Amino acid sequence: MPLIMTPILICMIAVAYYVFVPEDLKKNYKKNYMQMFSLDTLPYLLSACFVYLLVKSQLAVINLLGKGTYTNYDRYMILIEGDTVAYFQNFASPILTYASASVYLVGFSFLLIFTFLLLIYTQQREVLQEYTIAFVTIYLIALPFYIYVPVRVTGFTLPNVTPLLYDMSPIILQGVTIVDPFLDNCFPSLHAALSVMAMLMIFRTDLTRFKIFSLATTIAIQFTILYLGIHWITDMIGGFILALVSYFIATRYRTSILRSPETIIATFEKRTELVDAVNSILLSKGLIK
């Protein structure tokens, strides 16, 4: 599935450049492109790789802990909201299903990737740092829930909800199970959390047209996760809360978080210097060789 989505995303990013990048910034495109491929962007790319490794390690962690699909908490979701989510499929149609699937698979990925690239290109350094911190924070908080509180998708749990997304194509089902083998990574919803977080970060910039686009896309994503038979309403609410928490952490403690690696390195260097000084004294007195 990533191979199919990649050319689509590249085309969308190319079109979005002309639509959402302000004209004055397009004039300095050489400088901005050099900024995108400079070493300054390396920490943010490494953060994305870290998140990818987190996602890929989930199955290994579950196997290590001896946990499986038998430990799920669907029954609690049913107690909380029953089959309320089924109302979102009352007006299901092939056109709406295909449009929703496009938003869920492509629109969501585009929002996250283009936001990242746009913040780099427009040199919104502080917002980029906050976006990266919030992105990693969301995954760090969500991963324990996916391991210890697995909740299956509504389409395979509720009898009156159809798994519209997974019924569309075996390729889609296979692609999703690569990162969610048991289809139980529901609470909290990452689609809800990441899209809302991205929208909040975009609203910290002066990119007016992209603000409107991000708002519309985020609203559409919230509808699709319920309509396609994937998430529970509780998952969406949990995603909203997670987005707000990560946004608060990133915007409030950005400076402290970015300073932490420097503090650790400085502490390590001081301790190394102290050890070297002690060893020099011991050597001079012949206590060690």
Image (cartoon, rainbow, N blue to C red):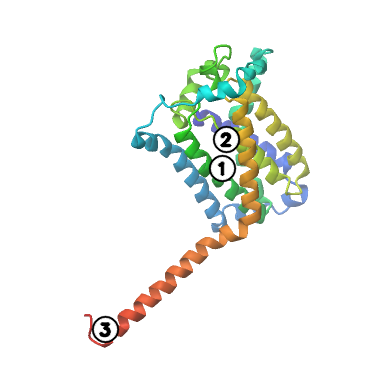
Residue plotted at (62% across, 51% down): 250
Residue plotted at (65% across, 55% down): 252
Inspect the image, locate mark 3, and give the three-letter code of the amino acid beneath it: Leu
Image location (x, y in percent) of residue 100? 64, 23
Inspect the image, locate mark 1, and give the three-letter code of the amino acid beneath it: Ile
Image location (x, y in percent) of residue 159? 54, 12
User: Does dot 3 land on a helix, a strand or a loop?
Assistant: helix
Can you say whether 124 is above or below 140 in the image?
below
User: Does dot 1 land on a helix, a strand or a loop?
Assistant: helix
Tag count: 3
Q: In the rendered structure, which disc, 2 or 1, sits on the residue that comes first in sequence?
A: 1
Can you say whether 282 is above or below 55 in the image?
below
Q: In the rendered structure, which disc, 3 or 2, sits on the residue that comes first in sequence?
A: 2
Query: Which of the 4 image quadrants contains residue 271?
Result: bottom left
**Nearer to the camera, 118 or 276:** 276
The residue identified by callout 2 is: 190
Q: Are marks 2 and 1 in contact (CB under 8 Å)?
A: yes
The residue identified by callout 1 is: 138
* Quadrant showing the C terminus: bottom left
- Measured in 3D between alpha carbons, the distance from the residue under mark 3 to the one under mark 2, in whole angstroms, is 57 Å
- Measured in 3D between alpha carbons, the distance from the residue under mark 1 to the one under mark 3, in whole angstroms, is 51 Å
- Measured in 3D between alpha carbons, the distance from the residue under mark 2 to the one under mark 1, in whole angstroms, is 8 Å
Q: Are marks 1 and 3 in contact (CB under 8 Å)?
A: no
Q: In the figure, is residue 56 to the left or right of 202? A: left
Label 3 crowding class (10 Å Cα cut-off): few <14, some 14-19, many 20+? few
Inspect the image, locate mark 2, and give the three-letter code of the amino acid beneath it: Leu
Query: Which of the 4 image quadrants contains residue 233?
Result: top right
Q: In the figure, is residue 264 to the left or right of 198? A: left
The residue identified by callout 3 is: 283
Report whether residue 220 is seen.
yes
